[in-house]
Image (cartoon, grey):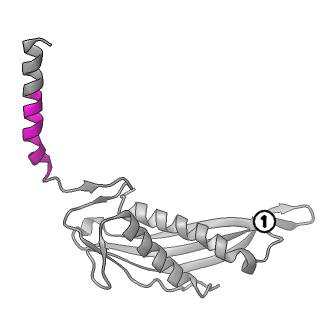
Amino acid sequence: MTLNKLKFLFTLSFILVLSVPAFQGCKISYSFTGASISPAVKTFTVYYIPNRAKLVNPNLSQQLTEALQDKLTRQTSLNMVEDSGDLEFEGQITGYDIRPMNIKEGDTAAQNRLTVTVKIKYTNNKNHDDDWEKSFSSYVDYDSTQLLSDVEESLMEEVLEQLTDDIFNASIANW
């Protein structure tokens, strides 16, 4: 290597080393999950999400509340607190519907669709410009020959995963 190339590499390395502290004060941190969280945010609260739908699954409120808490705990470094977190999630289940889909011969449904709709209010107590209130909906289709009671548990796993992904992406990942 020539002397000029060595000088150039040394100078470039020196500039990079000096510039690192300047970038450490950035206001947003990123993770491999796509989360962009201000360093000022340390905690979150997910309040119990009651079921206000006309058709009620008795376990859904607890399952959704816990699924959202688990998602935030697993995919962020935030600590969960019972009340007044830096980030707050509250809301209600507004819909739990079963509708026939894919009508086949004889005007009968080949499949049914289970749809769950929730209304969530997100409050960022460190930056209220990020606050929002939105509805999220997720559905899964199942064979109409099956009873809902026989497949409901596995269907709910899919629905809850999609709902928590959507809520996470709208709040933490800012999508």
Category of crowding for the residue at label 1, using alpha-carbon neighbours closer than 10 angstroms: few (below 14), some (14–19), many (at least 20): some
Return the x and y of residue 155 as percentages of the image width and height.
65, 70
Q: Nearer the viewer, residue 81 or 57?
A: 81
Return the x and y of residue 143 as percentages of the image width and height.
78, 66
Q: Nearer the viewer, residue 6 or 57?
A: 6
Residue at position x 39%, y 83% from top?
A: 47
Q: Is residue 56 left or right of residue 17?
A: right
Q: Eyeballing the image, is 65 above or below 102?
A: below
Residue, disc 1: 111
Residue 175 appears in which quarter of the rendering?
A: bottom left
Residue 84 appears in which quarter of the rendering?
A: bottom left
Residue 162 appears in which quarter of the rendering?
A: bottom right
Return the x and y of residue 23 as percentages of the image width and height.
14, 47
Residue at position x 38%, y 69% from top?
A: 72
State the residue lying farthest toward the top. Answer: 2
- 111 in magenta: no
Q: Eyeballing the image, is 109 above or below 53?
A: above
The local secondary structure at tag 1 comes to strand
Q: How many numbered markers are drawn?
A: 1
Specify start and end residues of the magenta stretch as a single range.
Answer: 12-24
- 16 in magenta: yes
Residue at position x 63%, y 66% from top?
A: 139
